[in-house]
Each structure stands twice: as C-alpha cells, then as structure tokens.
C-alpha cells in the first residue's frame, strides 16, 4: 500500500480492515498501512479502533505511521514486538493500551500522536526508548499496571529525551504488591 516516492497522493481510501474469524496474521509488515489517513478501524470492535487478531505477535516499523484517523490503539497481549515509529503521527488517537506481551516501547513508537490523552501500560513494560511519546503534549493520564517502586524503576530505564510528558502524568495500580 505504501509508496515511499509519493505517500500522500497514493494513500488508499481504506476505512476498515477486518480479519475473518479464525484467520491467522502474525506480522503486520513495515509500512503496510502507512499514510492510510482514512483508516478508522482494524478488526471492528465496539470499544477500540485498532483491535488486532489474537494471532498477531509483531508490528513492524512505520506499519501504521500517519494513520491520522485512527482514534484508539489497543496492543493486545499476544503482541510481543512493536518496532520503532509503528504508530508515529496517528494524530486522532486519544487512547492507548499496551498489553502484557510488550516489554520495550521502542524509539518514536507513538511520537507525534498529538491528541493522545490516556495511556495504559502493562506491568511487563520495563524500558521506554527515546521519543517513544515525543510531541504527545496532551497526555494527562498514564495508568501503569504495577506499583510505584516498579514505576520508579521503569523511569530509571526510560530515556529522557522526548519523554518528559510521561514522567509527570502517571498513576499506579496499587493492587499489585512489591
């Protein structure tokens, strides 16, 4: 779908991507849906707009870059790899859930998701790379599904460059013990 020579002019007008029941998709490749600025739903769901099939384990770099109509991103627990800049420039995204399969949020993964306000991060995340949340100035709530000691350790492993917003907008799930 992506044409690096003329990305904006060749952007297909896709609104929905639906995986048939029982279908298997393990990887969404590099640039697969980049610049599809009409995409509002993956695997239709009443609650989320990016709701991939349970078989998905990997999202390659820039796979959904600049999908500017995508309002919510749900990285289900089966996903173990989300490469750098996979969702950069998803300017309509207001919410994000990072499932238990992801340990590292790569460089620039959600950079320039300028309307992102709510982020839920699983306890398994132990490193956030530079600019992962760069230019996401509207984030006002981060729910980290672990305790404050674990959050402090995560912040120690977080590259400060471009991630200042997340250090000031978090809440820990106190249901988890040390």
Image (cartoon, helix red, strand yellow):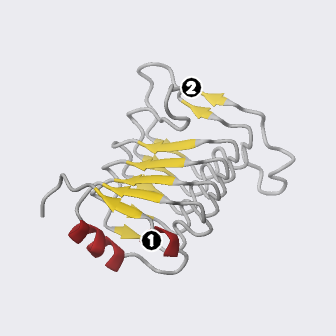
Q: Which residue is mark 2?
A: 18
Q: Of the numbered discs in the image, which one, if any, rests on residue 168?
A: 1
x and y, in percent, of residue 170 in the image: 39, 63
Residue 22, above or below 173 = above
Residue 163 in sight from this viewpoint: no
At label 1, counting other C-alpha atoms closer than 10 Å, the crowd grade (few under 14, some 14-19, many 20 or more) is few
- 36 displayed left or right of 71: right
Furthest residue in direction left, as rendered: 178
- Dot 1 falls on a residue whose secondary structure is loop
x and y, in percent, of residue 36 in the image: 72, 43
Furthest residue in direction right, as rendered: 9
Alpha carbon separation for disc pair 1 and 2: 37 Å
Of the two numbered discs 1 and 2 in the rendering, the one whose residue sits closer to the viewer? 1
At label 2, counting other C-alpha atoms closer than 10 Å, the crowd grade (few under 14, some 14-19, many 20 or more) is few
Furthest residue in direction top, as rendered: 21
Residue drawn 69% across and 42% down? 69
Quadrant location of residue 78?
Answer: top left
- Dot 2 falls on a residue whose secondary structure is loop
Please report whichever mark, 1 or 2, sits nearer to the chain's N-terminal start.
Answer: 2
x and y, in percent, of residue 124 in the image: 28, 58
Question: Quick one: quadrant of the N terminus?
Answer: top right
**Residue 146 versus residue 85: which sits nearer the camera?**
146
- 58 displayed left or right of 93: left
Question: Quick one: quadrant of the C terminus?
Answer: bottom left
């Amino acid at each position: 779908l992506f044409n690096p020579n003329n990305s904006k002019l060749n952007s297909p007008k896709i609104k929905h991507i639906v995986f048939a029941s029982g279908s298997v998709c393990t990887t969404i490749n590099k640039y697969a849906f980049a610049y599809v600025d009409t995409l509002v739903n993956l695997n239709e769901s009443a609650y989320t707009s990016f709701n991939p099939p349970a078989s998905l384990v990997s999202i390659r770099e820039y796979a959904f870059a600049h999908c500017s109509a995508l309002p919510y991103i749900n990285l289900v627990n089966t996903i173990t790899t989300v490469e750098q800049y996979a969702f950069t420039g998803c300017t309509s995204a207001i919410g994000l859930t990072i499932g238990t399969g992801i340990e590292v949020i790569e460089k620039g993964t959600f950079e320039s998701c300028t309307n992102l306000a709510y982020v839920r991060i699983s306890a398994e995340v132990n490193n956030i790379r530079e600019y992962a949340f760069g230019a996401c100035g509207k984030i006002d709530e981060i729910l980290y599904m672990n305790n404050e000691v674990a959050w402090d350790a995560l912040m120690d492993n977080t590259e400060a460059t471009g991630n200042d917003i997340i250090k000031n907008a978090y809440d820990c799930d106190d249901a988890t013990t040390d």
